Image (cartoon, grey):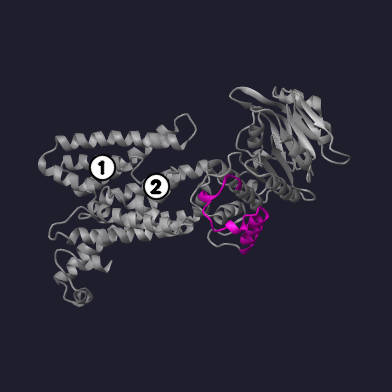
């Protein structure tokens, strides 16, 4: 069954129609990239799909159920969102912070479930944070905080991962590793991810589908090979973008040129 | 607790206390303990517990470590109510009613203004509360300057926080228990709320409803404490911090810990207030600040050296 489907979705921000009549279908097991210039509505779209913002018109369906009928913990078990600005530096430990991702799964008001501990420990290990478990998060670096936010999301274990610039603050190794971990949660599972990004090269390696916002409300959606073309990208970003093949069966490279 | 029962203008020994129930009906000791000290000790514990719980809630509601139970003007409203009653020479009964009425008025005023038309936001709530507080402050000063010297004395005692007239009613027991129960039921959601509104929302917390609940709960808890004992400062601000620094950042422990420490702290402070300059009694608010400041600095120093 289709994991996420939008029908006739319009998104307005400050009276500007950023997204017009979006018909998006995200199937389980797929990884989608969300590309577009600054201010074209990438974050607004992610927030609308996570039900943080209301849509101007149109409907959103999650596995056939109207999003309007879902809320609270049941919704949080199915949709998770990584915010662009990371996590606030509260006086909490890394482990406590990651454990908050288990909130929608807690059965008891008081007792801790050993399974939750296991899930959180695994999530921390996957993002190379296990050794920082007891550290206060206000002592972490920017990249470590970003990895912690990812670990919290993985502990939440939603079906639909919405990611707002997940590679922010990450070094090259962790960009690749972190996104591979996320992809592993999706590929072959009843889950999918949609990530907003400005790194076209990373996207071309990590994703199989692209939603490209053109800035005037229109969009292109389809396979990476169809959408990541010089003409589409140059039009969307308003500057000439060149595509260079790196070899047979390998991802292409993209760079802006004057 | 025991210290509080034993100490006071008339000193009792532990032996007296234990024998009191078995002595004759008219025993002076028994009367002192049963009629004066026991209710006062219980009232002190309740007030300390109510204020500390309210402090925990306010700090998370406003996401501000400097928030205390009085920041949104509840105590100001209660104070204006109480002072008006003193000004008019009303009975103690009417003083309570008037103080509670003032507090409720303030709660509703802030709530309505902060909600008017716009979306609920922390900044809006805080600003409204602070402005209303300032308004109450002006009225308090007006009442103080226009009153006779005698009434000013009792007004000042009330303003500084005073337990000498205090009797806790069953309402306050019920409220503290309800606050404890509700707080524990919500403690996981409160943990999540420290991550910010949007993150909490995507983790499945109904942020708007939770915020309104927290505001009303904290206000009513504060109001009932203020009605019993006036504006006893400092307890609601530092007790939650003390528990956090001692390692109780999880609200499942922070809430009961704060109630216990806050209650005990106020009982202790009140005992000192009654004994240090006996037979004269100090306002308990003075003592809480005098003990609170140095112990807070001590905890702050210790936690600073321990953190990795």
Q: Is residue B206 magenta?
A: no
Q: Is residue A115 magenta?
A: yes
Of marks 2 and 1, which one's residue comes earlier in the chain?
A: 1
The residue where tag 2 is placed is B218
Label 2 with label 1: CB-CB less than 8 Å: no
Disc 2 secondary structure class = helix
The chain that hosts pointer 2 is B
In terms of image quadrants, where is residue B105? Answer: top left
Q: Which residues are magenta?
A: A114-143
Is residue B272 or residue A146 the one in the foreground? A146
Measured as percent of width and height from the top left, residue A74 is found at: 64, 48
Residue drawn at x 24%, y 34% as measured from the top left: B139
Disc 1 sits on a residue from what chain? B
Q: Is residue B303 shown left or right of residue A227?
A: left
Residue at image location 17% in from the left, 40% down from the top: B87
Decide: is A105 above or below A63. below
* Residue A54 x/y as whole percent: 61, 33
Asked whether, in this view, residue A194 is left or right of residue B26, the answer is right
Compared to residue A104, the image places residue B24 above or below, namely: below
Q: Using the image, tell me which numbered label, if any, was put on residue B208.
A: none
Judge the density around disc 1: few (<14), some (14-19), many (≥20) Cα neighbours within 10 Å: many
Crowding at mark 2 (Cα within 10 Å: few <14, some 14-19, many 20+): many
Q: Nearer the viewer, residue A30 or B40?
A: A30
Measured from the top left, where is residue B255 in percent x and y?
A: 43, 56
Q: Nearer the viewer, residue B292 or B126?
A: B292
Magenta span main SS: helix
Q: Position of residue B154 (x, y in %)?
A: 16, 46
Q: Secondary structure at mark 1?
A: helix
Q: CA distance from mark 2 to mark 1?
A: 17 Å
**Label 1, on which residue?**
B79
- Image-quadrant location for residue A14: top right
Q: Residue at x 72, y 22 (%)?
A: A238
């Amino acid at each position: 069954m289709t994991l996420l489907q939008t029908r006739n979705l319009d998104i307005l921000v400050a009276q500007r129609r950023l997204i017009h009549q979006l018909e998006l279908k995200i199937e389980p097991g797929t990884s989608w990239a969300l590309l577009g210039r600054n201010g074209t509505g990438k974050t607004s779209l992610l927030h609308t799909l996570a039900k943080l913002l209301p849509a101007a018109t149109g409907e959103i369906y999650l596995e056939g159920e109207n999003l309007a009928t879902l809320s609270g913990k049941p919704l949080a078990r199915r949709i998770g969102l990584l915010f662009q600005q990371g996590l606030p530096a509260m006086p909490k430990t890394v482990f406590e912070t990651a454990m908050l991702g288990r909130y929608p799964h807690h059965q008891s008001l008081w007792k801790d479930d050993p399974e939750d501990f296991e899930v959180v420990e695994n999530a921390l290990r996957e993002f190379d944070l296990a050794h920082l478990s007891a550290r206060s998060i206000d002592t972490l670096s920017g990249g470590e905080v970003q990895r912690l936010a990812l670990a919290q999301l993985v502990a939440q274990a939603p079906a639909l991962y919405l990611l707002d610039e997940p590679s922010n603050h990450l070094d090259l190794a962790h960009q690749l590793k972190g996104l591979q971990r996320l992809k592993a949660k999706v590929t072959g599972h009843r889950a999918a991810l949609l990530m907003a990004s400005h790194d076209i090269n990373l996207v071309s390696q990590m994703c199989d589908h692209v939603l490209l916002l053109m800035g005037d409300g229109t969009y292109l959606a389809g396979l990476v090979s169809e959408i990541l073309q010089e003409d589409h990208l140059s039009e969307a970003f308003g500057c000439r973008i060149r595509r260079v093949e790196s070899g047979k069966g390998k991802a292409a490279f993209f760079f802006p040129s004057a | 607790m025991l210290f509080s029962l034993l100490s006071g203008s008339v000193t009792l020994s532990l032996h007296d206390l234990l024998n009191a129930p078995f002595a004759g009906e008219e025993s002076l000791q028994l009367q002192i303990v049963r009629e004066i000290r026991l209710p006062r000790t219980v009232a002190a514990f309740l007030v300390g517990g109510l204020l500390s719980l309210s402090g925990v809630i306010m700090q998370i509601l406003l996401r501000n470590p400097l928030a205390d139970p009085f920041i949104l003007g509840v105590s100001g409203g209660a104070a204006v109510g109480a002072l008006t009653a003193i000004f008019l020479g009303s009975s103690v009964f009417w003083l309570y009613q008037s103080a509670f009425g003032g507090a409720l008025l303030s709660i509703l005023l802030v709530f309505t203004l902060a909600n008017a038309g716009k979306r609920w936001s922390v900044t809006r709530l805080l600003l409204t509360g602070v402005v209303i507080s300032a308004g109450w402050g002006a009225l308090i000063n007006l009442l103080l300057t226009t009153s006779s010297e005698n009434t000013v004395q009792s007004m000042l005692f009330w303003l500084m926080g005073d337990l000498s007239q205090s009797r806790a009613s069953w309402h306050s027991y019920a409220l503290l228990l309800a606050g404890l129960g509700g707080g524990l039921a919500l403690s996981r959601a409160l943990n999540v709320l420290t991550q910010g509104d949007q993150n909490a929302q995507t983790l499945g917390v109904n942020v708007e409803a939770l915020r309104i609940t927290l505001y009303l709960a904290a206000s009513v808890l504060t109001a009932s404490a203020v009605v019993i004992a006036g504006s006893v400062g400092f307890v609601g601000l530092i007790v939650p911090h003390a528990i956090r620094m001692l390692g109780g950042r999880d609200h499942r422990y922070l809430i009961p810990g704060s109630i216990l420490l806050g209650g005990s702290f106020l009982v202790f402070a009140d005992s000192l207030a009654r004994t240090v300059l006996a037979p004269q009694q100090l306002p308990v608010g003075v003592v809480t600040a005098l003990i609170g400041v140095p112990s807070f600095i001590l905890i702050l120093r210790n936690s600073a050296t321990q953190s990795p």
